[in-house]
Image (spheres, helix red, strand yellow):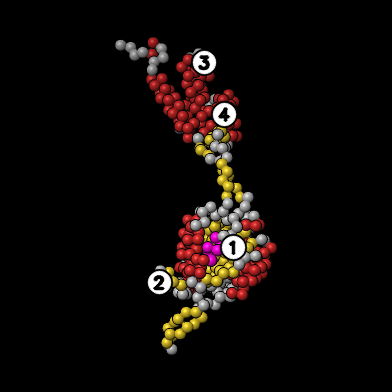
Amino acid sequence: MNIEFFQPWVFALLPLPILVVLLLPRAATALPAALRMPFFSGLQAGLSKPGKPLSRGWLMLAIISWILLVSAAAQPRLIGKTVHIPMSGRSLMMAIDISGSMQTEDMQIGGQMVDRLQAVKKVAGDFIQKRKGDRIGLILFGSQAYLQAPLTFDRKTVNILLNEAQIGLAGKQTAIGDAIGLAIKRLRKIPAKNRVLILLTDGANTAGSVDPLKASDLAAQQGVRIYTIGVGADSQLVNTPFGVQQISGSELDESTLQAIASKTGGRYFRARDVRSLANIYRVLDKIEPVSNDDLSYRPMTELYHWPLALALLLSLLIALGSSLGSRLPRHPSELPRA
């Protein structure tokens, strides 16, 4: 451990009071001071009356007080030894579809039918909570793609942001290409072999300015592996004027999702229910860890409040001593006569 000053240049101000006293001319007339400065009073008394021991004492206290003030302004810090934390976790960017079709209720949790987004929140939330030591990022996309959380070790915050997502918040359509493009932009600073995107959608690309296949080509060039998940039941029973009928429950563009995964060295998964979705995340949990990733820091404790408190205490003593000294008679002739 050692003490370092964050602003060491402040010590250049140490001779400032002496320079002020020696170089600045005295004022022609004494003006009432708006603020009493014990240091300058003590310095002036010490220079004008060097023979008095009491004056030298106040002068020394004033000098010490000034040194402490400058030291506090230099921001002293106690720096501990460097602590290295080897990281064996993974870096995963998750892109979740929140378009209008995600409100389709064809998933079941605890015997109750829920919409697709609620099922994704449940399974993906459990997945995030289990990734201790991993960096997780979150992108939400509909008609547009938005970064909700950059890559971070704060899994709790990422989970909160996922649970707060609402269907249609980013628009009713689906911009798969834009989501991939945004993920590539956020993953560029990650080592090439550790760039991973998990993209979950229940539809086809119907919006955005970037074609999904062209975005996947760019992802492959940047070394981003994309794992795509198609969510939604194949069919569902609905009430119609002609009675209960079975209709297609998904407009999923599986061929495009398969091509995206294939181009980038990832895999395509199909989640028809909550159980299969959970199994998919268990497979994704086996993605290779980030290698040669080392987190290091030096514990730091601020110390400026100690010299500041001592300087204020000395200034108070000087002020009290000066006030009491001015009230005491300095010569027998100053004593009151009977």
Characterize the magenta stretch by its predominant secondary structure.
helix
Which of these two is toward me, 57 or 333? Answer: 57
Q: Earlier in the sequence, mark 2 or mark 4?
A: 4
Residue assigned mark 3: 50
User: What element does badge 2 sit on?
Assistant: strand
Residue assigned mark 2: 112
- Which residue range is magenta in the image? 280-285
Q: Nearer the viewer, mark 4 or mark 3?
A: 4
- For residue 328: magenta? no
Q: Earlier in the sequence, mark 1 or mark 2?
A: 2
- Residue drawn at point x = 59 percent, y = 74 percent: 254
Q: Are marks 1 and 3 in contact (CB under 8 Å)?
A: no
Residue assigned mark 4: 14
Spatial separation of the CA atoms under disc 2 and disc 4:
74 Å
Which of these two is toward me, 333 or 238? Answer: 238
Other residues around mark 4 within 10 Å, as few (<14) / some (14–19) / many (≥20): some
Q: Nearer the viewer, mark 1 or mark 2?
A: 2
Q: Position of residue 195 (x, y in %)?
A: 62, 59
The answer to whether residue 158 is visible is: no
- Name the amino acid, label 4: Leu
Spatial separation of the CA atoms under disc 3 and disc 2:
92 Å
- Residue drawn at point x = 59 percent, y = 34 percent: 8
- Name the amino acid, label 2: Gln
Q: In what quadrant of the picture does the N terminus appear?
A: top right
Other residues around mark 3 within 10 Å, as few (<14) / some (14–19) / many (≥20): few
Q: Nearer the viewer, mark 3 or mark 2?
A: 2
Quarter location, residue 179? bottom right
Other residues around mark 2 within 10 Å, as few (<14) / some (14–19) / many (≥20): few
